[in-house]
Amino acid sequence: MKPQLDLFNEFRRIQNQFHNLFDPTWEVGRAYPALNVYSDQDKITVTAELPGLAPEDLDITVAHNVLTIAGEIKERDEDDGLKARKLERSRGKFKRTLELPLAVDSEKVQANVKKGILTLVLPVLESEKPRKIRIEAKA
């Protein structure tokens, strides 16, 4: 029974590699980069796992409530004579688009990278924030 199991696992591995040839934003069935989104009434915070990437490798845009994170994970230089034997880490261009739940002020977006985690803080527009409505009593 073991040869069938190994054959099935090999088939899934080849299928995943084939899929990644045509859509590099998906890595073994999951979108790349992985995102977490948090919000409160003042801001939306998005974190993305991007190990090994420098800020100059990324292109981040916000337009019409759509956040786009794009970039490229460059190939390793093979000038040192090393030959690849197994490659599991993603490489190549990627693009991830996320529709934001509220309108944000694109002029005040803050972005930083620390230990391979990109953090974006997107301030919510004042017009999107809840407002308390004052009720006037009429006699």
Image (tube, rainbow, N blue to C red):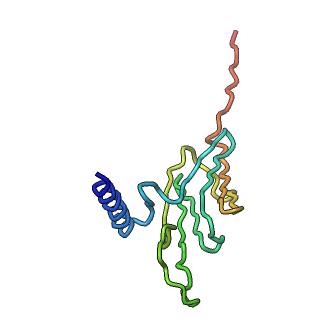
Residue in the picture at 32% in, 54% down: 2
User: Which image quadrant: the C terminus?
Assistant: top right
Q: Is residue 92 left or right of residue 40?
A: left
Residue in the picture at 51% in, 67% down: 89
Residue in the picture at 67% in, 26% down: 133
* Residue lying at the far top of the rendered structure: 139
Count of all numbered marks drawn on residues in the image: 0
41 or 82, nearer to the observer:
82
Residue in the picture at 70% in, 24% down: 134
117 or 137, nearer to the observer:
117
Give the x, y percent position of residue 132. 69, 28
6 or 76, nearer to the observer:
6
In this rendering, is residue 24 above or below 104?
below
Give the x, y percent position of residue 127. 63, 42
* Residue 23, quarter of the rendered image: bottom left
Q: Is residue 33 left or right of residue 21?
A: right
* Residue 128, quarter of the rendered image: top right
Q: Is residue 101 left or right of residue 52?
A: left
Give the x, y percent position of residue 80. 58, 89
In this rendering, is residue 94 above or below 101?
below
* Residue lying at the far front of the rendered structure: 1
Give the x, y percent position of residue 41. 67, 38
